[in-house]
Image (cartoon, rainbow, N blue to C red):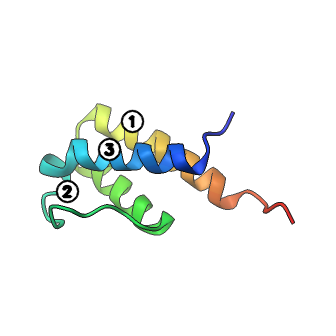
Amino acid sequence: MQPDSATLLRRVRELVERHRVTCLWYLRPDYQPATTAEALRVLDAIATNGSLQSFQDAEEVRRWLLRSSNSPSAV
């Protein structure tokens, strides 16, 4: 089952807060991604600059974001 967009956004925000000092030190202190593209860039930074666990957490959310952004719309 795919998480809804609110759950994904909450998860991204949690990861940003958890890894702000170690992986995202170059961003302004109150930064939170506002778009899927920004979220993907932040998740890539966490995966690149963090620990193995950080990488795994970021990649899990990134996969869900890519699935939800590539899914067909219900029209």
Query: Which of the two residues, 8 or 52, is positioned nearer the viewer here?
Result: 8
Secondary-structure class at tag 1:
helix
Secondary-structure class at tag 2:
loop
Query: How far from the left and from the top, in percent, is residue 33?
Result: 37, 63
Give, as a three-letter code, the residue at label 3: Leu
Q: Answer left or right for 10 relative to 25.
A: right
Query: How far from the left and from the top, in percent, is residue 11?
Result: 42, 43
Quarter of the rendering containing residue 38: bottom left
Q: Residues within 10 Å of mark 1 (few under 14, many from 20)?
A: some
Query: How far from the left and from the top, in percent, is residue 8?
Result: 51, 46
Quarter of the image for the N terminus: give it.
top right
Question: What's the CA distance linking mark 1 and mark 3?
Answer: 11 Å
Give, as a three-letter code, the residue at label 1: Gln
Label annotation for residue 56: 1
Question: What's the CA distance linking mark 3 and mark 2?
Answer: 10 Å
Quarter of the rendering containing residue 40: bottom left
Residue at coordinates 53% horizontally, 48% vertically from top-left?
A: 6
Mark 3 highlights which residue?
15
Q: Residues within 10 Å of mark 2 (few under 14, many from 20)?
A: many
